Image (spheres, helix red, strand yellow):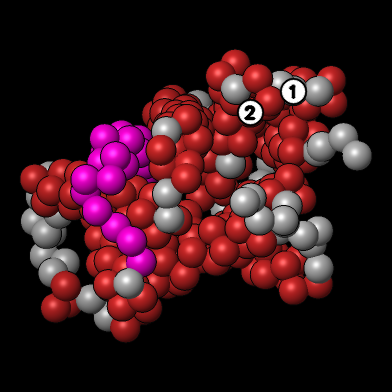
């Protein structure tokens, strides 16, 4: 029997705002530690640590898990796509700002609903959602054009970083579609999360080490307390606690109501980039970001 999901109450709204705030800090946290630890190594390390925490939770709580339950192949696919998303983020942050990455990454819901519209009859989009798609793509174009205010090498770098942000969003959307269209849609949330985190860890960590991660002399023994706190935030708070909290909310409340809050995440991300990293916000990028956020709201809006 399908459990009845509730409308949002004060607790759910407060928790969603807190989750969006934490997710908005993700790219900023990675950017802040990048001078000491490469972005790829950070994301691989946090995914590996979080995967171990999920495995520990599965064992401690006796949550059903098996590599022979039919979820292995879709789990591997989800893990590969998830690692592709974070590989794009890790490379992109070397070229563009955390603010830009936050906005372009969170265009993922736009690509997700387009895929669902084509693949699942019950997910056909309404007129308002199509308007949201157009609004979001217009916003992407305007935000992208902000790079042309630079010139030469700076222009090329920002275009590469912004493009990788959009590509990361496509990987994220593809991960969602694989989960929705496979046996993972009925699996335990811990199963889905474990495959994604383990896939990212197994791919990103070796890649970063082969790329000479510690060639500059920044070994873990030389990391200061700020770096360790950053890694703790990324691995435990973001990749473990916040994702499990999101799954918990989805099982108890209407997902269509929860998803409306997704526009807050890039808003928090841009604000954090400006406050913590002193990133600049041009009028053109601000307009593009607002169009993207408006599109996300329209896409997630459901008829009464």
Based on the picture, tell me whether residue 78 belongs to the magenta stretch: yes
Q: Is residue 221 left or right of residue 17?
A: left
Q: Which residue is mark 2?
A: 113
Contact (Cβ within 8 Å) of mark 1 with mark 2: yes
**Which residue does the image show at 21% across and 48% down from the upper left?**
67
Query: Which residue occupies the foreground of this view, 253 or 175?
Result: 253
Quarter occupied by the C terminus: top right
Q: Residue 82 is drawn in which quadrant?
A: top left
Query: Which residue occupies the foreground of this view, 107 or 158?
Result: 107
Task: Report the residue that reaches farthest toward the top.
Answer: 118
Q: Is residue 19 above or below residue 85?
A: below
**Which residue does the image show at 25% across and 60% down from the upper left?**
48
Q: Is residue 128 above or below residue 302?
A: above
Q: Position of residue 251 (x, y in %)?
A: 61, 58
Total tally of numbered discs in the picture: 2
Query: Which residue occupies the foreground of this view, 24 or 53?
Result: 53
Whether residue 79 is visible, yes or no, is no
**Cα gap from disc 1 to disc 2, whole angstroms:** 8 Å
Mark before the other along the chain sequence, 1 or 2 = 2
Q: Position of residue 181 (x, y in %)?
A: 47, 30
As helix, strand or loop, the secondary structure at mark 1 comes to loop
Whether residue 11 is visible, yes or no, is yes
Based on the picture, tell me whether residue 219 belongs to the magenta stretch: no
Task: Report the residue that reaches farthest toward the right.
Answer: 304
Q: Which residue is mark 1?
A: 125
Magenta span: 63-86
Task: Report the residue that reaches farthest toward the front.
Answer: 1
As helix, strand or loop, the secondary structure at mark 2 comes to helix
Q: Position of residue 137 (x, y in %)?
A: 67, 23
């Amino acid at each position: 029997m399908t459990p009845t999901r509730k409308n949002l109450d004060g607790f759910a709204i407060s928790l969603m705002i807190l989750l969006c705030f934490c997710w908005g800090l993700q790219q900023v946290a990675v950017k802040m530690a990048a001078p000491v630890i490469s972005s790829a190594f950070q994301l691989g390390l946090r995914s590996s640590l979080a995967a171990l925490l999920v495995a520990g939770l599965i064992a401690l709580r006796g949550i059903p898990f098996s590599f022979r339950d039919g979820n292995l192949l879709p789990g591997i696919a989800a893990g590969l796509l998830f690692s592709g998303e974070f590989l794009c983020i890790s490379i992109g942050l070397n070229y563009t700002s955390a603010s830009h990455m936050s906005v372009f990454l969170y265009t993922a819901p736009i690509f997700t609903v387009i895929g669902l519209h084509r693949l699942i009859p019950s997910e056909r989009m309404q007129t308002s959602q199509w308007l949201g798609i157009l609004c979001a793509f217009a916003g992407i174009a305007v935000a992208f054009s902000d790079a042309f205010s630079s010139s030469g090498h700076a222009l090329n770098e920002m275009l590469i970083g912004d493009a990788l942000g959009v590509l990361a969003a496509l990987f994220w959307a593809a991960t969602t579609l694989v989960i929705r269209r496979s046996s993972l849609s009925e699996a335990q949330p811990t199963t889905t999360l474990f495959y994604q985190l383990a896939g990212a860890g197994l791919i990103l960590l070796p890649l970063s080490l082969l790329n000479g991660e510690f060639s500059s002399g920044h070994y873990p023994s030389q990391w200061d307390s700020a770096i360790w706190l950053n890694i703790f935030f990324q691995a435990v708070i973001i990749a473990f606690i916040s994702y499990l909290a999101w799954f918990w909310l989805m099982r108890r409340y209407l997902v269509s109501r929860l998803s409306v809050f997704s526009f807050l995440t890039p808003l928090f991300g841009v604000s954090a980039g400006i406050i913590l990293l002193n990133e600049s916000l041009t009028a053109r990028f601000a307009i593009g970001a607002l169009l993207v956020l408006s599109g996300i709201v329209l896409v997630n809006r459901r008829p009464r």
